[in-house]
Amino acid sequence: MSELGVYEGFVEVRAIGLQGMVTIRGDFASDAFREAVTDVAKVAFPEQRGASVDGARGLLWMSPDELMLLVPHTEAAGCAARLAKALSGQHALVLDVSDARAVFRLKGRAVREIIAKLAPLDMAPDGLPPGELRRTRFGKVATGVWLEDEETATVFCFRSVADYMFELLSTAAHPDSRVDYFRSAAR
């Protein structure tokens, strides 16, 4: 798979290339932790299971003590270093995982269907509202999925399984595999 792989099915599957990603773990109840994170991220602290994004920068809530900082790939190492320095003395972990992850964007009216085919998630609109994310599995692959809006989802996984993930997503988006469950459920 190339860094710019695209599959045009009933949903577009696109490998979006290198993305700056910094894993941050710490005490969300600590004002000092929250201030250090938002100062470096330049976005608000996200709500539980949510995302706070402004352009190419964002914070994704991954668990009760973990965030994912999204920045341009060229800024990730510097952001990680600044944040590690700002959090020194606190119980915290900051790690640039940019080169360890692959990121895919799903675009189209049936993104819920693609995710429902692959993950044990409740994909009803109130089960995964737009703006929220979940950690899950697509097949046997550990995956994060962020439903940005009703027609856009971002999927991330380990880079070592990127080719498999691209094929898995492409197969789920193949026109002959369309189920239309969510379209028929809305009637």
Image (cartoon, grey):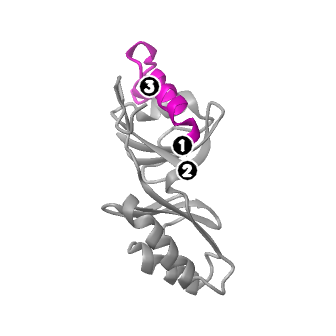
Looking at the figure, which quarter contains the C terminus?
A: top left
Which three-letter amino acid code belongs to the residue tagged 2? Ala
Location of mark 2 (residue):
100
Looking at the figure, which quarter contains the N terminus?
A: top left
**Between discs 3 and 1, the one toward the N terminus:** 1
Q: Nearer the viewer, residue 83 or 61?
A: 83
- Point 44% across, 25% down: residue: 170
Mark 2 crowd level (few <14, some 14–19, many ≥20, 10 Å Cα): few
Left or right position of 64 against 47 = right
Kindly indicate whether the residue at mark 2 contacts the one at mark 1 (C-beta within 8 angstroms).
yes
Mark 3 crowd level (few <14, some 14–19, many ≥20, 10 Å Cα): many
* Relative image position of residue 85 (x, y in whole percent): 55, 83
Location of mark 3 (residue):
170
Chain part drawn in magenta:
159-187
Which three-letter amino acid code belongs to the residue tagged 1? Arg
**Between discs 1 and 2, the one toward the N terminus:** 2
Which three-letter amino acid code belongs to the residue tagged 3? Ser
Mark 1 crowd level (few <14, some 14–19, many ≥20, 10 Å Cα): some
The nearer-to-camera label among 3 and 2 is 2
Left or right position of 96 against 27 = left
